[in-house]
Image (cartoon, grey):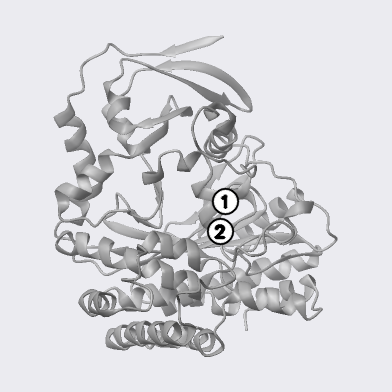
Amino acid sequence: MVKCMKQNFSTITEDKIKKGLYQRFIEPTKNNENNYIGIEIEIPILNLEKKPVDFQVVHKITEEFKKQYTNFKPQTIDHNNHICSLINKKNNDIISYDCSYNNLEFSFGRETNLFNIYERFCDYYSFFKELFEKHNHTLTGLGINPYRIYNKHIPIPNERYQMLYHHLCSYSRYSKLPKYFHDHPEYGMFSSASQIQLDVNYDNLIKTINIFSKLEPIKAILFSNSVLLGENEDLLCCRDMFWQDSTHGINPHNIGMYETQLKDIDDLMAYIESLNIYCTMRNGLYVNFPTINIMDYFRKDSVEGEYCDKGVYDKITITPKISDIEYLRSFKFLDLTYRGTIEYRSSCTQPIKDVLCVGAFQLGLKNKLYELEEIFENDEVIYHRGYNASELRKLFVKRQLPNFVDEDKLYTLIKQILDLSKEGLIERGYGEEVFLESLYERVKNRTNPAKDMLKKLGQDKSIEDIIDDYGRLK
């Protein structure tokens, strides 16, 4: 049966579309003098019996959390009446499950310093860890669930995640494209990230995107922690590949890095106008349709899509509405959001004892744009060697460095940038530089969590030892 949710068609002009995009993404950065921090940390759940994660255990522990932490109230309920997310309206912290009940996520309401976040993280994490271990499950700080092969890769039964999984599974529909697709459309159910959002001001917006884009190869060296054991152990951060070679990457502007040096806001607007949209909502239900450029979408009188109503898919015809801009989302390493923030989302979940090192590193550099720009302009270790930032990132997520890179000089460069981040944190005056200590150890030992894991496995350490080690809070 084909349903139709069309409205009387009225032309949406190009000017109206551009104005809508500007208001959503650019306008919030104007006069934005805020200096808040938002942190999101995803953590894999493991069944230590090497069986699928028991979702009934997950639901039971979620209910226990709700009873213990009475400020948290259910925010989202799935079709089976289980809690998907809880929110504390006093501080806007959210406890949720990302994509599936195999992946726990802590999202912290905006804060002024990292210690406030760390204190609450330790509290929440300790509660969940203790209860999961009573049921022979556990949590750990790995970017890829090492027990993924045992798990049931089933999306959370609600409109959002069923739509997303449906979209990712639709790659066979694009067989005529000259593009490679991996065969892990369920990757969101076993991959975990560490993300930070920082306020950005209109005056610094372009420079922030340009300079921090050049930082991404360095972050690959420091933070890689996503190895697909048993499949591709030469790739230390397979997160990049998962997005790039999925339906999200059909339009490469929707993922990865900016492949162009932005000159001004007009350049950035042109980039936003080049993005694709693949979903919207009608009558409270997500509608998925073949990914299409946002400007082309609004030029259509109607769009054929699909919606899922409690697990049952049906076809639908919709008429684009200007409010659909709300559902335009990219998955770039630097995502400009509607909140007047940039979300830095390229880093894997870290070992739990180092859980805030990603956020601290990025935060410390926030107000060091000009100093960082000078470092990159004068650098000849990785830049000015024939490769752009995106190409370098793809090289640096691999186990072996490319031959043109002098390892001694590379880690001298990383140490210089790390010192700059530390300087920025010291100037903030909260003592947050303590969260960088693990990164100095990584520079000293020329390693990262992925390399450490592979080294230990090569020394006959068990994956269970690593799960335990990477899951410890202290």
Three-letter amino acid code at the position of disc 2 = Glu
Three-letter amino acid code at the position of disc 1 = Asp
The residue closer to the viewer here, 211 or 48, is: 211
The residue closer to the viewer here, 421 or 71, is: 421
The quadrant where residue 303 appears: top left
Q: Looking at the picture, how far across and down is residue 138, in whole percent? A: 73, 66
The quadrant where residue 218 appears: bottom left
Q: Looking at the picture, how far across and down is residue 82, in whole percent? A: 65, 43
The local secondary structure at tag 2 comes to: strand
Q: Quadrant of the N terminus?
A: top right
The local secondary structure at tag 1 comes to: loop
- Which residue position holds label 1? 98
Q: Is residue 415 above or below residue 282?
A: below
- Which residue position holds label 2? 105
Q: Looking at the picture, how far across and down is residue 461, in whole percent? A: 79, 78
- Residue sitting at 32 percent across and 54 percent down? 258
Image label count: 2
Q: Looking at the picture, how far across and down is residue 316, in whole percent? A: 48, 16
The residue closer to the viewer here, 399 or 171, is: 399
Between disc 1 and disc 2, whose residue precedes? 1
Q: Is residue 350 above or below residue 213?
A: below
